[in-house]
Amino acid sequence: MSVPPTERVPHFPLLLLLSTLALLPLLLADIPPLVDYLNHIARDYILAHYRESEILPKYYRPDWAFLPNLAMDLVIVPMAELIPIDLAGKLFLAATLLLNVAGVFLLSRTLHGRIELPAYLVFFFLYHRLLLWGYLNFSFGLGLALLGFALWLRLRARPVTLRLAVFGALATVLLLCHLFAFAVYVLFVGGYQLGATFSEWRHGAFWRDRREWLLIIGQVAIPLLLFLTLSPTTDNAGAIRYGTFLQKLTSAFHVVNNYSRPLDYATFFALLGLIALGWWKRWLELARPVLWPLALGALVQLAMPETLFGSQTADSRLPIALWMLLAAGLKLKAAPRPLARPLLLGLLTLALARLLVVGVEWRRANSTYREYLSAFDKITPGARMLSVIPLPRHPSFHHPPVNFIGCQAIIRKSVFDPFLFADHGHQPIRFTEPYLELAKVTPGPVIYYDQSALTKGRKLKPEENPFRPEILHNYDYLLVLDEPLLPDFQHQGVRPIHTGNRFVLYQIEH
């Protein structure tokens, strides 16, 4: 056996190299191919250029409020007033990735007194499934939550007034970034203190730790009071729905689930196997301060709804945070000398291979997106465009994602897109009248067909059909993807003006 010489690892150059490689996909992609990103970046473009545009105020208006979903808007909008929106979006993405790396490494150093090798596992987790779905507010907030937890542990001996000011402000920022990022931070801090108190409850720890508990309650109460009194989100919470138990279990896989299923499965089970083997052989040790947050997080995950406050896949977010916390909390104590070096080199190679796959896929997306942008150049500025994208039920993950590709026409031609995220209480933007009502009654952009019914040529119900004349006459252009999958499309009153590989852009004749 040999104790790994962690102190001999050149952490700074290695961390700098891996962080640089992790950002390379951003340099290779014209537009980051993340599902909801295409929609979010269009909203931020509107907010940044609303005052100077003669067209955008016709369709949209700002709707700023105390919303628990503002990370992108608060960061990108001020930047986009000075630099191109595409660059501002990429800088935000880079900051998101680096915040997660910094959070895990600072927490590792705080827990162990030095950076431990398992902290490098974060490079397996950066391009997780939720990031690819475009859940960037949460991903950004998660990095801040990890940094906040590390800071909480570091400042435990500081004066209460200083800590209340610092962590009250931090908790408020986290809530503004994303509600679930705020909840993760509370879970980390509260779980840690719960473990510290229960471990010595026989020695009067409940009374001894009363100041810590009051401080936790105080810092959480500040943003929650603002949220409950100022935020319209509480009036638009929506239904609470639960997913299946199998969905909860498979959400743990999302941390490495991106583009290559064989590689993703190999990575997931390799990491699980190595962690289990290391724990069994006592090569790995878990820092005590993260034991309770991990255990409590697992219980919360089982009770978490699938839809909460209008946000879907709510129970898919916590496992990402728990994996990050585990990477920071693990310490490699010892390993057989013949095994240690090949194992570390193998993990490094696997991490680099995964980053290479992401880079290749993001570069491949460029040609697809350029096709759409060329088509949008033919649109009259200020027009109204309807996008229709057919998908069978239970579709595979489409790459590059085009669900909200029509939002790119907002950036290029200031069009009206009814599928922009503009819900009161959820985003800081709204449609103007009468376009608010038009957005409500327009089906899409994704039109779902049952696969078996699709093969039989089943027609859509009237409320599902975007091709009804009373809908189409409100628009100037129609973007149709995968037209053979749309038996309801009759080509009446439309004229094709651009044909791409998988789509046709039509001008609607009035």
Image: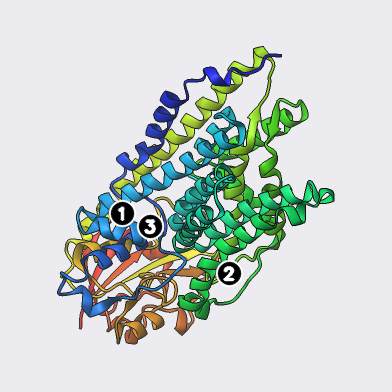
In percent of width and height, residue 274 lies at 67, 30
179 to the left or right of 45: right
Residue 247 seen from this side? no
Label 3 crowd bin: few (<14), some (14–19), many (20+), radius 10 Å: many
Quadrant that contains the C terminus: bottom left
Pick out the residue farthest to the right: 202
Whether residues under marks 2 and 1 lie with C-beta atoms below 8 angstroms apart, the answer is no
Which numbered disc flags the more N-terminal residue, 2 or 3?
Answer: 3
To which residue does mark 1 refer?
501
Q: Give the alpha-carbon distance from disc 2 to disc 3, as whole Å.
A: 21 Å
To which residue does mark 2 refer?
308
Q: Identity of the amino acid at label 2?
A: Leu
Query: Which residue is located at x 73 percent, y 29 percent?
Result: 277
Residue nearer the viewer, 315 or 490: 315
Q: Identity of the amino acid at label 3?
A: Tyr
187 to the left or right of 353: right
Numbered mark located on residue 37 in the image: 3
